[in-house]
Image (cartoon, grey):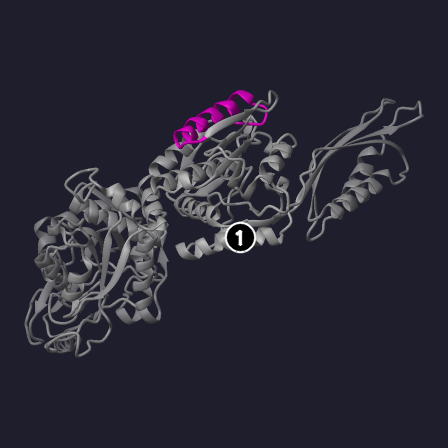
Amino acid sequence: MKTWYVLKIALMYNKKIIEPSDVINISDIPTQEHYSSKTIERVAKALEKGGHTVKLIEANMHAIDEMHNFMPKVMDGDRPGLVFNMAYGLQGHNRYTHVPALLEMLGVPYLGSGPEAHAIVQDKVMTKLVLQRNHIPTPGFWVFSNHADEFDDIIFPVIVKPTSESTSMGMKVVDNWNDLRDAVKEEIEKYHQDALVEQFIPGREFAVGLLGNADSVEVLPIVEIDLQGNPDKIQTKSDKVETPLDKICPAKLTVEQVEEMKRLCVVSYKKLGIHDFCRVDFRMDKDGHMYILELNSMASLGLTGSFVYAAKAAGYTYESLINKLLDVAVIRYFGESPTHSPQMDASENIRSQPLRIAARSYLRSHLRTTIDLLQELCKINTSIRNVENINRLGSILSKRLTHLGFSEHIHRQFDIGDVRYFTNHEGETNDVLLISHLDTPYAARDFVQFREDKAKLYGSGISESKGGISVMLSALQALRFSKKLKKIKCGILLTTDDSIGGQYAKSLIESYSKNTKYVIGLKWGALDGGIITSASGKDEYKINISNITESINPTISELIPTVCKKIISINKLSKKDNAVRITSINAQTSLGSSPDHASISLYTTFKTKSDANDIEREIKSILKKQEKIKLDIEISKGVRRDPYPESTNTKKLYGIVQEMADRLEIKIKSNHRGMSSDISHVPQHIPSLEGLGPIGGEFRSPNEYILKDSLIDRSLLLALTINKCAQEEK
């Protein structure tokens, strides 16, 4: 499902207390249900993050005037808008039906069920009759219009509740006639309606959320309400507010029980004519028999509610859940498009919106395409010496960037794969240079194929480079869609030796950076939204140690204990800002006069070059320290990756990114990373940042991943940052 257009969304809600200006007369009991202002604002922000224009409208007697001024006039040729209905109604009976009925009269599309479904579902007696008629298990029941009513087949215990209230209002369990009559009398007087007396089912309690319509209904993971081992326990409205019970999700059920509960939910959902979403409440007795208690056709969207709780377990963020609800309603009304023509002028309408809206709309609608591309990239094992695959990946990206208007210059590198530079202009100076790499450090035995779950995407290199490359392509495509890309002088450098310290790419990065106003690296961002403003450098060492013996008598030397002692001393050099990491040890001694041998691989990280030199000196001092046995020591050093220090220029570019993030309501944070990247080769007088790829983690491991939702947010952030950088003076 997708919504590739921008909508005007009226978010309708009710306040807690009816004011004189809300209605003409106060004629009946006011509703006890309402959303907090924080929840209303949270939903509005989620919709705005989806690229939509949102207006809050209080669902009172003035709502029609506000709707008339805000909603598009479809009869005059405007594209439709939609109401995101969070209004439970103000007063009287069947309150859920009031706003939907009003919207039906006005001809305005809205999220949620129609008046007829709400009327049935809010009346618990009618709900149970429909369930019984369709052979769906529900507890036996009796309806009391007066506390003196007589029934000769009641079996205690029973639960008493008003027939037309939600959120567990007025519930009470009783086990004798005297208490039952008292409870019924209290219910009728308090709620001005009949009392439902229902067979109480001791056991376990569950809540099941549903999303969708027709033949496409998604059942969210089942939530169990933790009754703390007490099968007779219930959760009243005050309990939910004051001492809410814990939730278990997914509930601990057998596969057969889960499937049966889902089946009952979907059948009930369809038979009652519910639209878009709802929550179904169950009890299950000690023998595993399931009973539907009720359905809530306006399931709570509060953070602590079971519907949102289940959605998060399914991999939704709050923002993606809210926009999913909107998409479900839009598809129900309009299919793929809310207009008479699939293409019409939707693109132009979107493009006329501010960049953040147009770009987000484009990115949301193309998320599946982005994931499919990422899967294609991750299938290719681009280990550092797999030149053929590295060049194959480069060719794939070359075709996509050429389509976006970029020309290519190839720097042939026969040992490691070709470095590729792209530009979309003919001038010498870039507004922005984007840096990533094609190589990954995985040998064939370590390579992990792409896989996807609800919230994460996995694969070798997905956070280090390939996720960042897909974010870059999405951002550039969104800028082109919004007619911004041609106004930006953009360069792209894709290197091929990141895994071995960037020794070949260093001079190219320095050269291209000198003619660029801003440089952005596309490695992964940290889980806290981290953008890399500084990073430690890295030195790699390979140490070979042999013993020198003049004895002709066969013996086992003390080489291994001596080497171990030196390793312990080297390891103690690690400090807060400068680390020493031993990555491998191999040693062998034998009975004889041949030299014994040991090899050690290690690396160090450091904040400054001075620190690096100090650590190197100390390592050599430890290795050369006189021991009881004579040693021949050979120290070879790999390519140094320089540290990436935070600078005034770094802070300048971070300030631009922060400004864009604030505008988009995306959380970012300045981070120091323990290991630098190609960004360290950028001259310090050029503003640069690393880590604008997707949010991810566990790099260089079998579980390397990125967060699926971050593909949109980080692509959008990158697009706005690139556009802003093009407008900034150096």
Residue 311 lies, in percent from the top left, at: 32, 51
**Mark 1 Cα-neighbour bin, 10 Å: few <14, some 14–19, many ≥20:** many
Disc 1 target residue: 654
Q: Going by the image, does 302 lie left or right of 27?
A: right
Quarter-of-image position of residue 169: bottom left
- Residue lying at 27% horizontally and 58% vertically, measured from the top left: 54
The answer to whether 68 is drawn above or below residue 608 in the figure is below
Q: Is residue 132 above or below residue 155?
A: above
389 falls in the magenta region: yes
For mark 1, give the secondary structure: helix
From the top left corner, tell me how far across and down residue 308 is, in percent. Answer: 32, 56
Query: Which of these two is toward me, 55 or 676?
Result: 55
Residue 133 horizontal/vertical position (percent) = 7, 51
**Quadrant housing the N terminus:** top left
Highlighted range, magenta: 382-406
Q: Is residue 16 magenta?
A: no
Query: What's the amino acid at mark 1?
Result: Tyr
